[in-house]
Amino acid sequence: MEKKSLIMVVDDDLIYLDMVRGIISEYYNVILATSGVQAVRIMQRDRAPDLILLDIVLPGMDGYDTYEHIYSISELSGIPVIILTGVTGSTAELTGLSLGAQDYITKPFEREILLARIRLRLDSGRQARQLQIMR
């Protein structure tokens, strides 16, 4: 049996954290963080996740700053990030994608769309790691 991928969900809204965990925990192992600072600490202390679902509006360090901080740490820089946020508008989406996020999903979201995008980004991340190993 294949090992479940580990997904970190970073959101200060406890209702959304619980809802996302409920949706994805059947298929993936889940770590929760309520702030960018907490997320970075967890990743540095424990195992790095295979994918991060990251909100933009967070206390202290917002999602964009959290993303930049994660990618400044070489051991964490290859983790795929999907921005999962209530922030709408092309400027916010463009900012997230310009930073390097692999996807941008707005709340509220469809369960099956979230799961499909997670699978897609995990598969892409695996393929990228395999290519690096082969080089």
Image: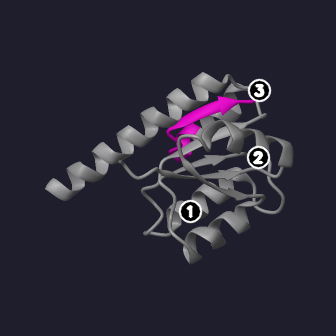
- Residue at 51%, 36% in the rendered image: 118
Tell me where residue 25 appears, x and y as whole percent: 61, 44
Q: Earlier along the polypeptide chain: callout 1 or callout 2?
A: 2
Q: Which residue is mark 2?
A: 17
Q: Disc 3, disc 1: CB below 8 Å?
A: no
Q: Which numbered marker is on residue 108?
A: 3
Does 79 appear in magenta?
A: no
Which picture quadrant has residue 86? top right
Badge 1 element: helix
Q: Earlier along the polypeptide chain: callout 3 or callout 1?
A: 1
Residue 34 as seen in the image, left or right of residue 121: right
Residue kind at label 1, given as amino acid type: Ile
Residue placed most toward the observer, 32 or 3: 3
Badge 2 element: helix
Quarter of the image with the C terminus is: bottom left
Q: Which numbered marker is on residue 70?
A: 1
Residue kind at label 2, given as amino acid type: Leu
Residue kind at label 3, given as amino acid type: Pro
Does 103 appear in magenta?
A: yes
Q: Estimate how packed mark 3 is, as few (under 14), some (14 to 19) or many (20 or more) residues with alpha carbons within 10 Å.
A: few
Badge 3 element: loop
Point out the stretch of residues depicted in magenta: 97-107
- Residue at 53%, 41% in the rendered image: 27
Q: Which numbered marker is on residue 19?
A: none
Q: Residues under labels 2 and 3: Cα distance?
A: 13 Å
On screen, residue 26 above or below 41: above
Residue placed most toward the observer, 37 or 114: 114
